[in-house]
Image (cartoon, coloured by chain):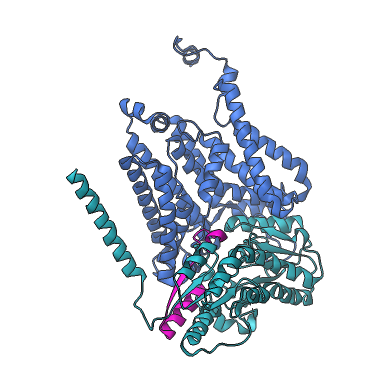
Chain colours: A cyan, B blue
Amino acid sequence: MTSLFKKVSKISLGVVTALGILSAVTTPAMAQGERFVMIYHSPDSDSWWNTVKNGVNVAAEQMNVTVDIRNPTTGDLADMARIVQQATASNPDGIFVTIADYDVLSGPITDAVDKGIPVITINSGTHEQSEKLGALLHVGQPEYDAGFGAGKRAKSKGVTSFVCVNHYITNPASIERCQGYADALGVDLGTQMIDSGTDPTEIKNKVIAFLRANPDTNGILTLGPTSAHATLAALEEIGRAGDIHYGTFDLSGEIAKAVKSGVIAFAIDQQPYLQGYLPVVILTNLARYGVLPSGHINSGPGFVVKDNIALVEKYAGEYR
Amino acid sequence: MASDVKKSAAPPEDERVKEMSRFSKALIRPELGAITGAILVFMFFLAVARDTGMFSPEGAMTWSTVSAQFIIIAVGACLLMIAGEFDLSVGSMIGFAGIVIAITSVSWGWPVWLSIMTAFFLAMSIGALNGYIVIKTGLPSFIVSLAFLYILRGLTIFGAIATTRRTIIGGVREAAEGDWLAPLFGGTILTGSFQWLADIGLLDTFSRGSREGQPIVDGIPMLIVWAVGLIVFGHILLTRTRFGNWIYASGGDAQAARYAGVPVNRVKILMFMFTAFCATVFATAQVMEFGSAAADRGLLKEFEAIISVVIGGALLTGGYGSVIGAALGALIFGVVQQGLFFAGVESSLFRVFLGIILLLAVILNTYIRRMITGEK
């Protein structure tokens, strides 16, 4: 009996020590007291958020504040709602959160607002949704408008039939991008949006298959590096790189290179760095001095083309 | 010579073995369901999508490549499953191995051959650790490898961000230029023969764009070569060697196998290492082809591997299955996935069709097996 007790106490002591070490590692030194929480919707493995996180880290260092970055590990939005509730319960000095799905998140976010926590919405979601939730402002890129802008550029280059390579079809924003593009061209979206999945080999071969089955396609829109890189490889393989008008959302080293060589006509930069950087700065200044910009902030769309690529390329994937 | 044939044609009768006609003997194969399924799937697409270019050289190359990818991980998963274990960390292992190659070669400037070998070494060590923990603790491999699914994915993301502040690391293609090992994974073979086929007019050439005049299919990608190589290796190992019998025995009844002197622990650990090897082949080929590694590569691949194996007629409980079957399962999976695009199925419905066809394949498979073996 005593030995069992000893064993149990030994184990629990070990667990407690381990937890202590863990918490010492995860809690950075307290700065000037302010603590903010950023919550976003993508699974751990989504590479795009890295730039936002870099923005958060730079701002947190400059402002001398702590920012906890939280997300549902698998991208499950129900988990995300739970995380928002947890964050609210921890009484931070401010929360900035993506409106990945208005219906799922409106309850928890409104609760945070009603509790008196300053909330800024970032990235996904519209200005109207942000206002309805009672958030201070929205920092992001209106998705439909960005897609529409891309479509206008494509139309001026004579695009009449296109394929929208969607690697994240479960996100409503992704469909709005394709829809905006189609509307600007004045054609029906129909089957021109393909659900490509996320595996590069599969995306590449699906694009080849689509172009093979629809040979009159003369425009391509990809929704981010995941689909863009594989589509580049596909065009390379069938020898149509530079032949088809090709626009993409977001930036990466490889996309920048393709813009330079003329294979990609433009990359739409929503400047995610700002979506991480600005909320921290705004919330800090609000907490310290009570100042707040009025109105929403459009971090994008910025169009990256051959002429302005130099600076962008240097920091692609890191700060751009 | 003639007497030899006579001898082998009339082996001594063994009264313990039930007599069976040669026909039904030929039918009792794990891969029979998969063969039937594959024929049905091809017939379906031949009927629906024959004129869309799905069966042109270029179209065939798209579904062959995708299938080859599934085959590579399915062969590993198949041998492991026959040995009675699962590995759910395959997908995370793919991401991990890719990032290891990219970090060591691009960020640290190692020669690419050394990076690739390091990735194989690390992956197979982790595979061995996986197996060792399963053997030592007696826990289901389902749980142990599930833990590694998270550990490896987490390490991959952490490693990529800590060293480069990015989760997609590019520049591998430039680093791999002139390397002797990289073409073994990312290159193509028989480019000369394909050019020759095009020259004599048997193969179409590009009529526009940057590659005008070149054949539309310029060679067999190494991904396909690896897939075929692994099938041959796995099939011979399983059916022609003593080690193959040990694999079946370990999965059928581990305790009975131990009594019979089969080194069950060694077999299982080696199979975990082989699965990790296959995942690394997958990862390396993909990194070399696309020139970049990303922390989110390989998501859900462990389930796609297991699905291929089950379509191929293996039992989830171990001890029964075949490499050929698993490869056919992977082929069905790849052909269905690509074929739906050629058939012009509404894109958002393609997962529905995929699920239905997979379900049908497995049901057909099980039904045929029960019918033949008389098992209930």
Q: How many numbered circles are shown? A: 0
Look at 81% across and 67% down and name the residue there.
A187
Q: Quadrant of residue B132?
A: top left
Q: Position of residue B240 (x, y in %)?
A: 44, 30
Q: Which residue is outermost to the left?
A: A2
Q: Give whichever of B348, A120 is nearer the camera.
A: A120
Res. B72 in view:
no
The reply, left or right, for residue A80 in relation to residue B143 is: right
Instruction: Give the answer, above or below, for where A126 lies relative to B145.
Output: below
Look at 59% across and 30% down and name the residue there.
B366
Instruction: Give the answer, above or below, for where A11 lies relative to A107.
Output: above
Q: Which residues are magenta?
A: A51-80
Look at 56% across and 87% down and name the residue there.
A292
Look at 35% across and 47% down and name the residue there.
B128
Q: Give whichever of A267, B56 is nearer the camera.
A: A267
Q: Which residue is outermost to the front?
A: A115
Q: Position of residue A277 (x, y in %)?
A: 51, 80
Res. B94 in view:
yes
Q: Give whichever of A259, A236 is nearer the camera.
A: A259
Q: Position of residue A105 (x, y in %)?
A: 59, 66
Q: Quadrant of residue A297?
A: bottom right
Quarter holding the C terminus of chain A is bottom right
Magenta-drawn stretch contains A65: yes
Q: Give whichever of B114, A279 is nearer the camera.
A: A279
Q: Position of residue B343 (x, y in %)?
A: 75, 48
Magenta-drawn stretch contains A305: no
Quarter holding the N terminus of chain A is top left
